[in-house]
Image: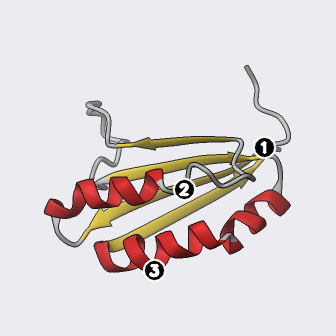
Amino acid sequence: MLLKNTFVHHVHFWLKDKADKAKLIEGLYSLVPIKTIRDIHIGVPADTNRDVIDRSYDLSLLILFDDKAAQDAYQDDPIHLLFVDNYAKPLAAKVVVQDSVNV
């Protein structure tokens, strides 16, 4: 199925300490109740090994929104702000965000 009218927010996290993986997963699941999220996927690198695949990250967050306004509201949602302060900033050594919209 071709997704239409979708704002995709994909975030990859590299942990400072691999022992904190469960803690960051806990934080990622805390985002689920945010009302502007259409769909959410929390994952780890798949066991796929091709030259074009980057499996260096520890955790992945993929969120689908209806539009940019919904994504903007998510960014300002108190639950998201708590996640950033209590989980992402203290636990992640690196965070890469890739946002995309339909063509």
Q: Amino acid at mark 1?
A: Thr
- Compare residues 61 and 86 and report the one nearer the observer: 86
Please report whichever mark, 2 or 3, sits nearer to the chain's N-terminal start: 2
Query: Residue 67 location in percent, x, y?
Result: 83, 52
* Residue furthest top in the image: 1
Q: Amino acid at mark 3?
A: Asp
Taking the spot 35% from the left edge, 72% from the top edge, the residue there is 94
Q: How many marks?
A: 3
Taking the spot 80% from the left edge, 58% from the top edge, the residue there is 70
**How far apart in space, not on screen, are marks 2 and 3 (Cα)?**
13 Å
Query: Residue 21 location in percent, x, y?
Result: 24, 56
**How far apart in space, not on screen, are marks 3 and 1 (Cα)?**
27 Å
Left or right: residue 102 versus residue 64 is right
Indicate the secondary structure of the residue bearing disc 3.
helix
Query: Residue 16 location in percent, x, y?
Result: 22, 72
Identify the residue position indicated by label 1 in the image: 6
Q: Amino acid at mark 2?
A: Leu
Identify the residue position indicated by label 3 in the image: 85
Instruction: Look at the picture and state if 5 lies above or below 93.
Output: above
Identify the residue position indicated by label 2 in the image: 31
Query: Badge 2: few (under 14), some or many (20 or more) residues near its Cα, within 10 Å?
Result: many
Select label 3 or label 1 by which is in front: 3
**How far apart in space, not on screen, are marks 1 and 2 (Cα)?**
19 Å
- Compare residues 10 and 89 and report the one nearer the observer: 89
